[in-house]
C-alpha cells in the first residue's frame, strides 16, 4: 500500500512538472505542494506574439549587457525573429517559444550560427523575465562558452 501511495505522489509531481505552469514550492510530510501564480496567464500556453517587443539582455558572468528586439518571423508566423545588440556587436536570431521553453539561434552574418539561447519563461515575474543558458560556439581565435542569461522585458508589448 505504501508503494502505491509513493507512486501516486511521484505521478502527481511529474504531471505538475509536465504542465509547465505549476511550480513545486514546498513539501508537507513528504507530499509535494504546487502553486500557480494567479497574477498572470498560464505561461505554458504563451505563443511567440506574447514575447514581441524590446528586452534587456544581461550576461552576469561575462559582465555584458545589451538589447534584444523580438517580432514575428517573416516566413514562419508562429516563430520569432530578433535583433541583438550585445557587447557592441549586432546579430540576428530566430526561434520559438513552446510550453514555456524559449529557444533562439543567433547569427552574426545571417548565415553561420554563432550561439544558441535556451531558457524558460519565469512565472514569478509573469513572463517579464526569461532565464536560461547562452551557448556561444567556437570561433577562430575565440573558444566557445556556456553562460547564464537573463532577458527582462523593457516595456509592455502589444498583445501581452
Image (cartoon, grey):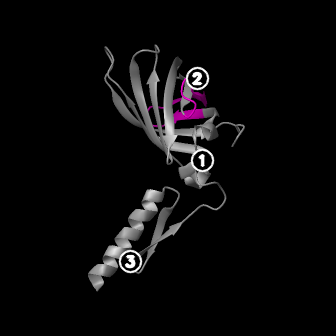
Q: Nearer the viewer, residue 140 or 41?
A: 41
Q: Which residue is mark 3?
A: 30
Circle 3 SS class: loop
Is residue 153 rendered to the left or right of residue 138?
Answer: right
Instruction: Sort mark 2 into few (<14), some (14-19) or many (20+) by Cα contacts within 10 Å.
Output: few
Residue 45 lies, in percent from the top left, at: 56, 50
Q: Quadrant of the N terminus?
A: bottom left
Q: Position of residue 125 (x, y in %)?
A: 60, 51
Q: Which residue is mark 2?
A: 74
Residue 85: within the magenta? no
Residue named by callout 1: 127
First in sequence: mark 1 or mark 3? Answer: 3
Q: Which mark is residue 64?
A: none
- Tell me what residue is drawn at x 58 percent, y 46 percent: 46
Q: Vertical placement of 60 versus 126: above or below?
A: above
Identity of the residue drawn at 31% across and 15% down: 141
x, y percentage for residue 20? 49, 55
Please name which of the two marks, 3 or 2, marks the residue nearer to the observer: 2
Q: Residues within 10 Å of mark 3 (few under 14, many from 20)?
A: few
Q: Where does the C terminus fall, quadrant-wise? A: top right
**Compared with residue 11, is residue 48 higher up or lower down, i.e. above or below?**
above
The span shown in magenta is 56-78
Q: Is residue 9 visible?
A: yes
Decide if residue 90 is on the left or right side of residue 147: right
Residue 78's spot in the image, x, y percent? 56, 34
Whether 72 is among the magenta residues is yes
Label 3 – label 2 distance at C-alpha: 49 Å
* Residue 59 in view, yes or no: no
Amino acid at each position: 500500500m505504501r508503494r502505491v501511495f509513493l507512486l501516486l505522489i511521484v505521478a502527481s509531481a511529474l504531471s505538475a512538472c509536465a504542465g509547465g505552469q505549476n511550480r513545486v514550492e514546498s513539501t508537507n510530510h513528504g507530499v509535494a505542494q504546487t502553486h500557480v501564480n494567479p497574477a498572470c496567464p498560464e505561461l505554458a500556453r504563451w505563443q511567440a506574439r506574447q514575447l514581441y517587443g524590446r528586452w534587456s539582455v544581461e550576461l552576469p558572468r561575462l559582465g555584458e549587457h545589451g538589447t534584444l528586439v523580438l517580432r514575428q518571423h517573416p516566413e514562419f508566423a508562429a516563430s520569432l525573429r530578433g535583433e541583438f545588440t550585445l557587447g557592441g556587436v549586432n546579430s540576428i536570431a530566430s526561434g520559438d517559444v513552446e510550453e514555456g521553453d524559449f529557444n533562439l539561434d543567433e547569427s552574426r552574418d545571417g548565415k553561420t550560427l554563432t550561439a544558441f539561447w535556451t531558457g524558460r519563461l519565469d512565472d514569478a515575474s509573469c513572463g517579464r523575465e526569461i532565464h536560461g543558458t547562452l551557448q556561444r560556439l567556437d570561433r577562430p581565435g575565440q573558444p566557445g562558452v556556456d553562460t547564464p542569461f537573463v532577458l527582462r522585458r523593457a516595456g509592455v508589448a502589444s498583445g501581452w
